[in-house]
Each structure stands twice: as structure tokens, then as C-alpha cells.
Amino acid sequence: MSPEAPSPRILVIGTGDTKCEELQFMASVITEADGQPIMVDVSVLGDPPYSPDYSKHDIARAAATTIEAIAESGDENSAMAAMAKGAAALTRRLYEDGLVDGVIVLGGSMGTDLALDVAAVLPLGVPKFVVSTIAYSHLIPPERIAPDLMMILWAGGLYGLNSICRSVLSQACGAVVGAAKHGTRPDRERPLVGMTSLGSSCLKYMKYLRPELERRGYDLAVFHATGMGGRAYEAIASKGDFAAVFDFCIQEVSNHHYSSVVTSGSDRLENAGRAGIPQIVAPGAVDMVDLQAWQALPEIFADRPYHAHNRLIGSVTTSPEGRREVARLIGQKLGQAGAKVAFLLPTEGLQEWDKPDEPLHDPDGLAAFLDEMRRAVPPSVTFQEVDAHINSPSFSAAALAIFDSWVAEGIIPEGRP
């Protein structure tokens, strides 16, 4: 929270013409929690029965238009998109001026669409809460979810206040005020290194690399690459917040290619390169696709080796030709990078369950992937084969040697012990 603020200032965003009762109730809860509600109206046609701090006319001006032009745009989709543009621009300006400590948005599918744009303009660590009728739905594309976005289902509250609605809204308002009061924002005392992985039962290199990187004066953030973790990694990378990355679990590229719901979006393995961040990349777990363990396997995978990790998620191996397809896709993505990239190819295996006597052991599939990957890596990428399994200490040592050489060359900033 801003040091000069006596209590956290929370933007409360919604359509005041249709949700006035709910929004005013939220404002009262925030006030009781020792917060300062700042009411932002994103209505298009009507007006709220209260005077918002920022009206629909302010929102339209922030979008470089008028509310009349928005109302006459022809359909509700384009109108709300314009209001989303204005709400995001206003939120960004207020934050940059030091006038906002958190934001909460209330809405159905249209309000949620707007909320995602608003949350995206605020940096990591600024509390952002969405009360939505489609919370956690697959309607929400992972590319649009801010890394620290909080959501709660607006259960039973689509039309008017009731006991269920009050319970949900009060929890949400208490959460955003509490986060603004007590949340700790990321510091930048040490250069931040991003890393992707799965749990240590599958991938283990972070156990070797973390202590070495911390000893060198770096802060290491390891992202669980099961869809949303990879999305958070990509979102932070897109803002250029990493000094370097060890993107060693790119399984989400395979997941997205095979239309799994365990996806980080179509731009997985692209944002660090676009932002000019040095990347050391390896194909950890890219030989398998994650699926819901509580559903029947898709027919395409019916005869493939399968491992149920728990009651939520299971992994199935892809065919040799499928692995060749993914290798070519990886090569295309690496070729788009605008900064230094090294690709490490561990020749003895890509995850713990592909070892001999493990459920996903498939030497023919591994051979096909290695063969295609050698051809797919573009000339602009430093390519190195490592005659080891990805979970071997020798693989981590090879990665660390590249990292150290890039620090010595000034490609990666020096750590601060």
C-alpha cells in the first residue's frame, strides 16, 4: 500500500445502472474494512442512482471517445470493448499517479471481459479481484489472465442482493482490502531468473540449480508448468521482468498443440524472446500431454502409455510422429526470439517417467524427437546436446555453464549476493 495512504484505496468497477445494489453493498463492506472505495461506473445506456467517482463519461474520454459514440457503436460487444479500453486506461493512469492500491470488478461474462483488461494493466503485487459468474470457466482464455488475479464465483447473485450474494461479495471485498493492507510486493534487490518445471517427482533440475543461482546472487522463481503456471511465466516474461530464464519444461507447447485444457495459450515459449530476455531452453516433459484424469482418454491417445499423477491430472505419451510435429513447432518458436537463446537437448530422457521400467518409457518416441529436434533448431540458436537425462546433475551443470558464460559476457546482468 502507498505509504501516504491512511487506508487502501480500492477501485470498485461495475455497471452501476444494472448492479447498483451490489456495488453499493461492496462499497459499504470496503469502508467497514477500513478501505476507501473509489466507484467507477462502466454503464453504457443508463446511469446509477449514486454519483460515482468516475462516470461513464470519464471512461469514454479515457478511451478517446464519447459515451454517445460508444452507445451508437452498433452492438453490445463493441460497446463493452470500448468501455474496457477506457477502464483499463483510467486504471493505469490512477495507479501511475499513486492513487490506487487495489481493484475489484463485478460482472457477468461482459463485466469479466472488461475486468481482464483492467487487471492486465496493473503490475504483479497490486491486488486485483474479479467477482464473476464465469469464474474459473474455460471460457476465459489463459492469455488474458493476470499472474496474480484472484477470482470468486458470483454465486446466486446475477439479479439482486440475497444472503448468498452478500456472503460472496463481502468475502471478495474483505480479501482485496486485506491484500492491499498486508500484501508484500515483489522486490528487485536481486536479478530475477524465471524457471519452468513440473513437480520433483517428474523433473528435478531445480533442486540442483536453485542453490547455485542463489549463491551467485540471483532470485529464482520456479513456475509449475501445468497451464496457469506457464501462463504466469509468459505474462511476467512479456513485461521483461526476468534477467534470464531457464525454460526447461515446455510441455505446455505439446498440450496446446493437442488441444488439452492444460494450456498456457498459443504464445507459450514466445514472450521471453519478444522481450529480449536471454533464454536457456530444454524440452522437459515435452514428450507427453497432460489431460484431466477424471475424463476418458481422447481416442487419439487410447492406445498410448498413460500415467495418472493424481485424481486431477494424468499424462499420456505422444506418438513418434506427434513428437516430430512438436519438435518443429519448438524450432519455429525459438527462431522468433530477439535475444540470445541456447537449446539443450538431453539425449537420455526428458522426464522421470520415461526412464526404463517407468510407465512412459518409449525409446522409439524419444529417438524420433531427438532426430527431428536436431534438424528443427534454427541457426540463430546455440545448440548443445547433453549425453544425460534431464534429471541428471550433469545436465544442470551444462545449463549452469552456459549461464555463467553469458554473465561473463555481459549478456546476463551479474547477481547481487
Image (cartoon, rainbow, N blue to C red):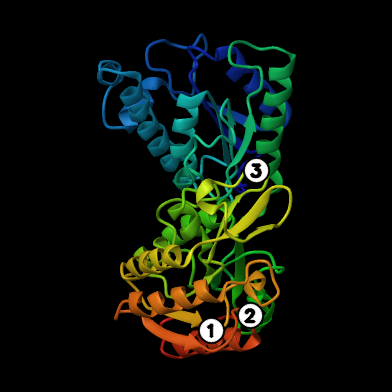
> Which residue has dot 2 on it?
209
Foreground pick, 336 / 79 = 336
- Amino acid type at image mark 3: Ala
Choose the circle earlier in sequence order: 3 or 2: 3
Is label 3 or label 1 in front? 1
* Picture quarter with the C terminus: bottom right
- Amino acid type at image mark 1: Ala
At which x and y percent is residue 37? Answer: 59, 28
Left or right: 182 as drawn, with respect to 10: right
Q: How far apart are the two marked residues, 3 and 2, measured between alpha carbons?
A: 33 Å
Please give the label number shown on residue 399: 1
Count residues near mark 2 (Cα–Cα under 10 Å), then give few for <14, some for 14-19, many for 20+: some
Residue at the spot 40% in from the left edge and 55% down from the top edge: 267
Above or below, 127 against 53 in this view is below
How many numbered marks does the figure carry? 3
Choose the circle earlier in sequence order: 3 or 1: 3
